[in-house]
Image (spheres, rainbow, N blue to C red):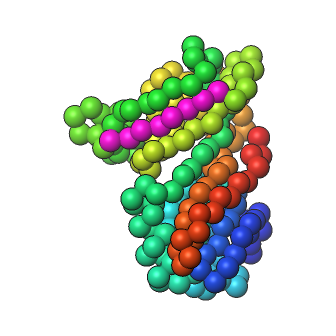
Amino acid sequence: MPLTDIGILHQDPAFLIVNKPTLLLSVPGRAEDNKDCLITRLQDNGYPEARIVHRLDWETSGLLVIARNPDAHRELSRQFHDRETEKAYIALCWGQPATDSGHIDLPLRYDPPNKPRHIVDHEQGKHAQTFWRILERHGDYCRVELTPITGRSHQLRVHMLAIGHPLLGDRLYAHEQALAACPRLALHAAKLVISHPETAERLSFECPCPF
């Protein structure tokens, strides 16, 4: 498959910064019809050395860092593991929070009976933290900036649901009104800060939100 819709925002010998479109997997799925993905498209179109460092959900768009050699992959992966990166997402959420910002600290776990959903579980869940702040308020929804401290699967989606403000267009977690309010999942990885894997220079990348 071609690189259609994948924006390459930065490249050097160590890594790429790309803009993943919505409705594209980060890595291949298990099913045969889920082989098309961002990393495969890169590998098949001029970047055979590309290695995934972190992932975005299928419906989430925005910034991903891709390593181009084993040493860069090791160092960038370490930065994500040790929470040395900084990430910010833009989202549209249903309703109007009572305050303009907040902090969510709720443990999460996979919910096998309802896969691929995740749930809050205070006994078996893994620690998860998210900061949020309102950017704009509209009638039935608001635009928010979400800053995850941890990187759990579906963390932002489940955390916002847990405080009563599901993301618009979320087919897994939104109620009927919130689902109908946006034609796609309204979640975009808009900012990413990393240290260059070779020079340790602190680098900040931004990608405009498409909604």
Question: Is residue 133 covered in magenta?
Answer: yes
131 vs 91, left or right, is: left
Q: In the picture shown, does residue 204 fall above or below 166?
A: below
Foreground of the two, 140 or 195: 195
- Which residue is the extreme one toward the left? 123
Image quarter of residue 8: bottom right
Foreground of the two, 100 or 123: 100
> Magenta part mainly helix, strand or loop?
strand
Image quarter of residue 92: top right
Q: Position of residue 52 (x, y in %)?
A: 52, 71
User: What number of labels is visible?
Assistant: 0
Q: Position of residue 174 (x, y in %)?
A: 56, 30
Quadrant holding the N terminus:
bottom right
Q: Position of residue 153 (x, y in %)?
A: 44, 49
Foreground of the two, 115 or 207: 207
Residue at x-position 66% and y-position 67%: 17
Foreground of the two, 71 or 94: 71
Residue at x-position 39% and y-position 59%: 82
Residue at x-position 59% and y-position 69%: 201
Magenta residue span: 127-134
Q: Position of residue 53 (x, y in %)?
A: 50, 68
Question: Is residue 158 covered in magenta?
Answer: no
- Which residue is the extreme one toward the top? 98
Quadrant holding the C terminus:
top right
Residue at x-position 59% and y-position 63%: 202
19 vs 127, left or right, is: right
Looking at the image, can residue 41 be seen?
no
